[in-house]
Amino acid sequence: MLQFLEYSMIGVASGGIYVLAALGFVIIYKSTNVFNFAIGEMMMIGAYLFYAATGQLHLGWPIGILAALGGSMALAAGIERGLLQPLIGQPTIVLVMVTFGVGSILRGLAGMIWGPDIIQMPDFLPRKPIFIGDVLIPGKLAWGFIAVGTLSLAFILYYRLSRTGIAIRATSADQMTAESVGINVRRVSSLSWAITGLLTGAAGIVVGSLNGLTPTLGLVALNVLAVVMLAGMTSVGGVVVAGLFIGWFETLIGAYLGGAWQSFMPYLVVLVMMTVKPNGLFGEQRVERI
Amino acid sequence: MADSIDIAAGKTTQLVPGRQWAYWQVAGWIALIIALVALPATASGYVLFMATLVAINVIATVGLNITVGYAGLLSIGHSAFIGVGAYASALMAIHLGTPLLLNVMVGSAAAFLVGLVFGAPSLRIKGVFLAIATLAAQYSLYFVFQQWTPVTGGDRGLSVPQVDILGMGDKGFYLLVVAVAVVLCIASRNLFRTRIGRAFIAVRERDYAAQVLGIDVVRTKLLAFGLGAAYAGVAGGLMGAFLRIVNPDQFTLLASVFFLAAVVVGGQASLLGSLLGATFMTLMPEMLRATMEVLGPPLGATDVAGFLSPLREVIFGAMIVGFLYFEPRGLAGLVERVRALATRS
Amino acid sequence: MPPLLTIDRVSLAFGGVNALTDVAASVADGDITAIIGPNGAGKTSLFNITSGFYKPASGTVMFDGKDLLPLPAHARPKLGIARTFQNIALFAGLSVLENIKLGAHAQLKANAGTASLYLGPAAREERDVTAHIENNILGFLNLSEIRHRAVGGLPYGVQKRIELARALVMQPRLLMLDEPFAGMNANERLQMATYIRRCVTESRTTVLLIDHNMETVLGLSSHVVVLNFGKVIAAGTPDHVRTHSGVIDAYLGAA
């Protein structure tokens, strides 16, 4: 029982990372209708930027975080401004293909610059384990979860309460109407990419600190997709629940059935959700007008 | 139905050639086939090897172009279906000793069926979801290839018995692959002379308008995706018999990026595009490697091979992005422009 | 003779807003029936229910004695229902002829296998349908010259004719035209009205059409249904509707 509780805590804590990245995915989908297949690679670049600043340039972790987050925001905004804005009006499939191509480019660049081998990130999260009663949670994970949770919460509040958040939601509901009430749809799109850069950068730093750094770190994107399918593409609140659940579920499967089943889980979730409940558990059923 | 934005003007499938151009076109195709058949007489072993590889990749690219180019469905796990065809066909050859063409057909059918398993749930919803489902296929099938050791041989893979076509060795195999490629190219062309191909394009452009014409959108999408997977299965069966080995590392995400790049670089919804794209993409890494070997490894990198693999990821990705951005009609679009210039003067 | 299409007590809502309320209308076999009303009255919604894009919250839609509502959209053309769209729904990636051939989709039989081979029946039916279109449709709608052009850059009026051609290839029993006269000048309107009339007299097609311009429609149709704010406010002969006070109010109010 104690072991089960420990696994559960570890799972939920690692699910926080999925929440953060999945929020980034959903926000872009809501404001631009694009599936961002570079989401995992954006996380990876954030992590490498942090490593470059702290491990290679020895700048200390606060500057490292600023550099990594700033860098990933700039990268995301650059992708949106440079590649996606000019293609507006093209079929969605073209935009999605571009994000997929960008993912490949980023993966290759990381391999060329930092090599294929796993890199240990400089420690900045306290290692000292935390006890809740008898349940032990590894220190890095606990602090990582606190960081990720705080950021998710801040984002959700921003999304719910700020003018920008309202603009994003309005654009998602009906782009034409949003435009007619004076919302700058292009700005909303740029902004959601920049926000996604921030969220994925942060998620990347935490994943990198926990598991080490390789160019294939972006593979966690599959778990993120599983989260998004479970939550429904459009539900910000649902993503939180689904993200924590996937993290928990995955860890338990890994602990009791083995790593092989753990890596198989996200695809199963994706396929089952598509078959059973394509709008996710919290997604809205949209009436499409012709 | 939100997807049914007006399609890029580039996807005009029906060219309207002048009569003279039509003759040139036919002459060009005939010349190409003669050249392909005559090639083994003069070519070195290396050239023959590359030519066979190009022909196999053409088959896979033609298939992916049916799915992505004509039907507008994004599949980013094409290499996984090539893998299904390769393993199914190799297992037939190893355990049953059946003839190659039969193995390839079974491989193709297997890829078609596995394709439906991954395609059916997502295509009931909305086209874009196929991208997620195929990405799931990419990773989960790779995982099956790697982990199901008793059947697939795990990381070491399967070694496939040699096939000798008419006692002609490599040349015979080359000619067989070219024949299959030609037949499948003609088949895909024929498809777009009939209701089946028209329905693919109709569903790509305006699914609601397709419905009032009596087109079952979900079935049509499934067929377009399944056909793409079936072509991949043929390519996989031939690939395994050609390289005489089938292992998981042939069917990675990078290989899927490769084929998507081949479609985009060559030209979506164009047979000529598939040919040009597959040829270009197959030869390009070779040229890259040759250049690297001459220039030596770049600063900081210790070995050429370790540098080439990520460089390929960058270049394949850049090809997709660059062509979508600058020439969405691909190399076939460039050819079309040259033709327009030539017929005007 | 019973009506070909009967719409009975149909209601439809979008997110709490009633688009249609208890709408009833019928289309007599062999007639031209018009649905008119100001913009946003629910005319196209009624078409979309009949085509199978929207499911009404309540009510029935019967076609030739069959309940249409359980059928998916793509099964309805086989019963003999064809339609055009207000915003023209042609396929830009195909030529004029190929667009029109799509109308024959449900009649043709080729499957992926026979189509790939393109021998025997698959090739023959393709030639037959091409010949049918060239002989009976292209000339009638004056499209022969441009049949190999891509539809993309063609003028609006021509695109409307292509869409009509595509619907006619389906040899429909009920032809639903959504604003066939929209964006046309007086001359083109006259021409389009002639085409529609000939469809009825020569091919025994029944026509249901939408327009917001009363004058064009009243001269053409024998039965008129007037919608306003999702409700039927009048129905009957053109003369009856023309003098109906509610109709005059709706139009003056809307204008």
Image (cartoon, grey):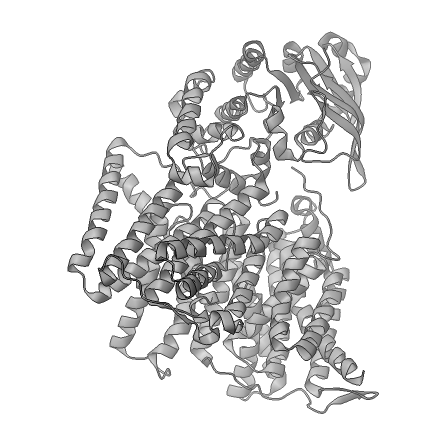
Question: Which one is in front, A174 or C33?
Answer: C33
The residue drawn where x is 63% and y is 84% is A62
Residue lying at the far top in this picture: please name it: C239
How far across and down, in percent of the image, does residue C11 sit? 80, 31
Question: Which one is in front, C175 or A96?
Answer: C175
The residue drawn where x is 72% and y is 80% is A10
Question: Which one is in front, C31 or A94?
Answer: C31
Rendered position, A263 above or below B263:
below
How far across and down, in percent of the image, does residue A259 sit? 62, 77
In this picture, residue B78 sits left or right of residue A191: left
In this picture, residue A212 sits left or right of residue C92: right
Residue C134: quarter of image: top left
How far across and down, in percent of the image, does residue C246 sit? 81, 17
Rendered position, A194 above or below C255:
below
Asked if residue C9 shows in the view, the reply is yes
In this picture, residue B338 sits left or right of residue A58: left
Residue lying at the far bottom in this picture: please name it: A128
Quadrant of image for the C terminus of chain A: top right
Asked if residue A188 shows in the view, the reply is no
Residue lying at the far left in this picture: please name it: B42
Residue B10: quarter of image: top left
Quadrant of image for the N terminus of chain A: bottom right
In this picture, residue C225 sits left or right of residue C126: right
Question: Which one is in front, A123 or B345?
Answer: A123
Rendered position, C87 above or below B310:
above
